[in-house]
Image: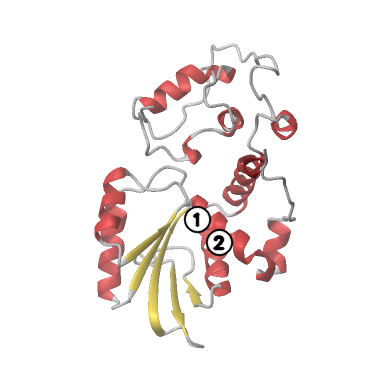
Amino acid sequence: MRWERPDVVRSAINQDLLYSLGAFSTVCQIRRNDAAYRLGHILAGADTDPGARPDTLLALPKADTEVVDSDEAIASDGQDIIRYSRDRILARIREKYSGHSLQNLIAEILRAEGMTCKVYPEGPDGGIDIIAGSGVLGISAPTIIVQVKSQTTPVGSEVLDQLGGVIGQHRADRGLLVAMGGLTAPARAKVDARQLMVAVWDGEEVLDRLLEHYEVLSDELKKVIPLRRAWLIDESETD
């Protein structure tokens, strides 16, 4: 096996192809919705899925060759239902907490983890979206400067440079970058070099923490992202 592009985040692929890419099969052919052109575009270095070309006939393959829609995604034994569910929740987060409003979701999660948060209003913020700290006033160590980027494309190293400068300017203990679309390869290398100073949450990490603390989050948030727990047989542990 050879990984051609290990840095591609799931959010770079449009939802219609994600259903197909969630198949359990080790080897499969994705044919729906101009998939070859779109995935080739990503493989060549593009950050986002360009979508199907306007002159392409969007014919769906037969149901026995590929998962074709959300109903079949749930019903088919070849579909990773957990991955499908996570993608659905992530899509709801991106829909309901786009732009500045994502700060409110991140602040709720940080509060559930025991932090006191000050959320900055929309507008020029000097590189600070949230200040989080311990104690009643939120100024006890560790103090954390949080930047929140809701974009679905990877964030570059210049954002980390800005965050590092703000951390030093305000003499904060740590920095947290929330990048829903993940990081570019150079940015990830820079984070690894500064691992004691800056933490990064991508979309998957935000989802993990949302699920971990869901029961204690606000009723308002639960109305926006209504979830219920379900138990599945772990096929990997059965004969």
Query: Amino acid under label 1?
Result: Glu
Q: Residue furthest front?
A: 239
The disc label shown at residue 93, or none: none
Disc 1: which residue: 205
Q: Quadrant of residue 97?
A: bottom right
Query: Amino acid under label 2?
Result: Arg
| Residue at the image position 75 percent from the left and 32 percent from the top | 75
> Disc 2 on helix, strand or loop?
helix
Question: Residue 208 location, x and y as percent?
Answer: 56, 57
Cβ–Cβ under 8 Å for marks 2 and 1: yes
Question: Residue 29 location, x and y as percent?
Answer: 54, 18
* Category of crowding for the residue at label 1, using alpha-carbon neighbours closer than 10 angstroms: few (below 14), some (14–19), many (at least 20): some
| CA separation in Å, label 2 and label 1 | 6 Å
Q: Which of 120 and 59 lies nearest the eye of the viewer?
A: 59
The image quadrant where one finds the N terminus is: top left
Disc 2: which residue: 209
| For residue 224, side relative to residue 132 (left or right) | right
Position of 79 relative to 128 (above/below): above
